[in-house]
Image (spheres, rainbow, N blue to C red):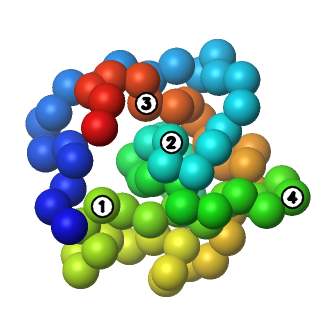
Amino acid sequence: MQPSLRPRKLVLATSLYRKLMPEHVVIVHHEGLDKIKRIQKIQADQIFVVGDNHRASLDSRNFGWLPISSVVARVVWPRR
């Protein structure tokens, strides 16, 4: 799958989100970096995130589940 966002692409994100759901694109803070990923699964207070470019992305398949508290914001534009 090709990435939804290209390098240098402008995104609009909000930290005022109500409920996170699978397929939402979020900005997560992990290992000192902010990363844009898509939520694949939610369980209790954890999320499993994946990148749209499955072959090149470092995501939960590599580093495991993340706490929901690692979510910095939800991307609201552009939409998929």
Percent x, y for residue 60? 54, 73
Work out whether mark 4 precedes mark 2 in sequence or the reverse, and give the earlier one: 2
Kind of residue sitting beneath label 3: Val
x 43%, y 53%: residue: 37
Which residue occupies the foreground of this view, 24 or 64?
24
Front tag of 3 and 2: 2
Which residue occupies the foreground of this view, 26 or 40?
40
Work out whether mark 3 precedes mark 4 in sequence or the reverse, and give the earlier one: 4
Kind of residue sitting beneath label 4: Ala
Work out whether mark 4 precedes mark 1 in sequence or the reverse, and give the earlier one: 4
Residues at discs 3 and 2 in contact (Cβ within 8 Å): yes
The residue tagged 4 is 44
Q: Is residue 21 left or right of residue 25?
A: right
C-alpha distance separating marks 4 and 1 = 24 Å
Kind of residue sitting beneath label 2: His
Residue 52 bears which disc, if any? 1
Percent x, y for residue 18? 71, 23
The residue tagged 2 is 24
Q: Which type of secondary structure does the marked residue at label 1 adopt?
A: loop
Kind of residue sitting beneath label 1: Asp
x 67%, y 70%: residue: 65
Residues at discs 3 and 1 in contact (Cβ within 8 Å): no
Percent x, y for residue 63? 56, 78
C-alpha distance separating marks 2 and 1 = 12 Å
Which residue occupies the foreground of this view, 3 or 23?
23
Work out whether mark 2 precedes mark 1 in sequence or the reverse, and give the earlier one: 2
Residues at discs 3 and 4 in contact (Cβ within 8 Å): no
Q: Is residue 30 left or right of residue 79?
A: right
Q: Which type of secondary structure does the marked residue at label 4 adopt?
A: loop
The residue tagged 3 is 75
